[in-house]
Image: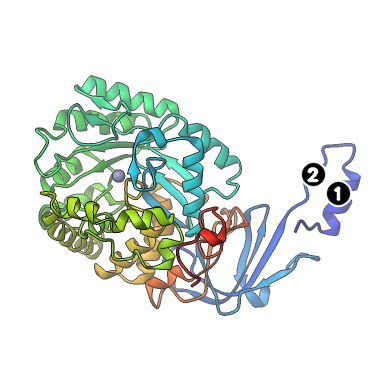
Amino acid sequence: MRTCSWMSVAALMAGALTAAPAMAKTVALSHFTLIDGTGRAPVKNSAMIITDGKISWVGPAAKLKAPAGVQVRDLTGKFVMPGIIDSHVHLGLVDGITQDLKYYTRESVERQLKLYAAYGVTSVQVLGTDKDEIHDIVRDIRADPAGRARVWTAGRGVVFKGSYGGVVGLPAQVATPAEATAMVDREAAKGADFIKLWVDDEFGTIAERMPADISTAVIAEAHKDGKKAVAHVFYYDNAKELTREGVNGFAHSVRDRAVDAPLLSAMKAKGVWQIAATLSREASFTYDLLPFVDDPFFSRGVTPQVIADLRNPERRTRLSSSPTFPKYPAVLKYAMENFGREAKAGIPYGMGTDSGPSARFPGYFAHWELELMVKSGITPLQALTAATGSNAKFMGATNVGTIAPAKAADLLVLDKDPTADIRNTRAIDSVYLAGEQVPTIWQTCTGRAADACTGGPK
Ligand SMILES: [Zn+2]
């Protein structure tokens, strides 16, 4: 409902000779417990005014002065937090659980962004597998999200020729520091918000990881272009070297051994972030059948065909007989323990899932990730802060991540207290994107008719 104060009606009438001012759209929310994304303790009996998609006032419900004619939505018993930010995703890569870059279209990207929003994930950061079309989509969303989660993108990430990283079909390989430098400049010029690089060899199955002279060149050029450099890492040794080279963030945990005091103190000294621990990624590889296929919060976000494909005995045999399958329990254990050690040591961290590739599900994985982060030794409030204010801080996303005046009204309204039990992030009452309610996963099945939903109600 569009509402006008008398003031703006008068201004509108008087303003006929000048430019007609747009009517402000105002929404007021009251009597909720506020979790503001800064890490501050929740504040009961809070209220908020949203004007034209932005938070214009937040404070105690007793001091709420809603403009005349604005209906106040009473959220007694509910919890309001900033929309979740997933700092590590890939968009548009799959149809069901089949992965192929040919599925990357504006339509498929936007469909996924709406699914993220339905799960309360109102911003995502894409780590290096975007086609160039992303920059047009990002511009459109920045002007008006229209139900789509906001996007920050690395464009194409830098892959060392023949080594691990990127996606098949998207040219992103460099062989020399000069090629790396040129590629970084190209991505920055196209509009990349930051630069991604991969340093890995897939359990030693690939001959060479990106050499240090190339990662050094990538990081230095990113900084010259005013961008942060974010690295895919697996090995402790690479994390140490990249820290020395000035990398800004790690997009995965170290997963080959325990992090130790020398690495932790180097990361701290250089200000390196663990932007994503991707615990849900490692956990997903640990099972031949994902442990949540029957959970309606999951199944409502996918087609019945996806459930059937996940249950398919042939797929499960193929997965469980792969040589990497037995490695993942240890990989997950290192990822969780190392994340816990970093948090304890005061390394800054965000929340990211690496969802988007086959069987790593947009939206649902963010909630699973939060749960696994808490299992790794942080509090629910710390996990929520990582996924909101901290992610925004690393991304330089000044308009999202916290609840304060002038921030975008990207909100997740919950029926239950997520600081008491992190799984309560799933009790989604409503989601606001730029002040507009969008269909939640409990209200929609990713845009399909309700009778096509696999899962039941909450
Ligand atoms: Zn990734």
Q: Quadrant of residue 331?
A: bottom left
Residue 7 percent across, percent down from the top left:
84, 56
Circle 2 crowding by C-alpha within 10 Å: few under 14, some 14–19, many from 20: some
Q: How many marks?
A: 2
Horizontal arrangement in the rendering, residue 344 relative to residue 395 (left or right): left
Whichever of callouts 1 and 2 sits on the residue coming sooner in the sequence is 1
Say what amino acid the circle numbered 2 marks. Answer: Pro
Q: Is residue 398 visible?
A: no
Query: Is residue 45 or residue 25 the one in the foreground?
Result: 25
- Residue drawn at (42%, 36%) of the image: 104
Q: Residue furthest front?
A: 313
Circle number at residue 11: 1
The colour scheme used to paint the residues is rainbow
Say what amino acid the circle numbered 1 marks. Answer: Ala
Residue 234 percent across, percent down from the top left:
17, 47
When the figure is inspected, residue 32 is found, relative to residue 130, above or below; the finding is: below
Q: Quadrant of ligand 1?
A: top left
- Residue drawn at (44%, 27%) of the image: 190
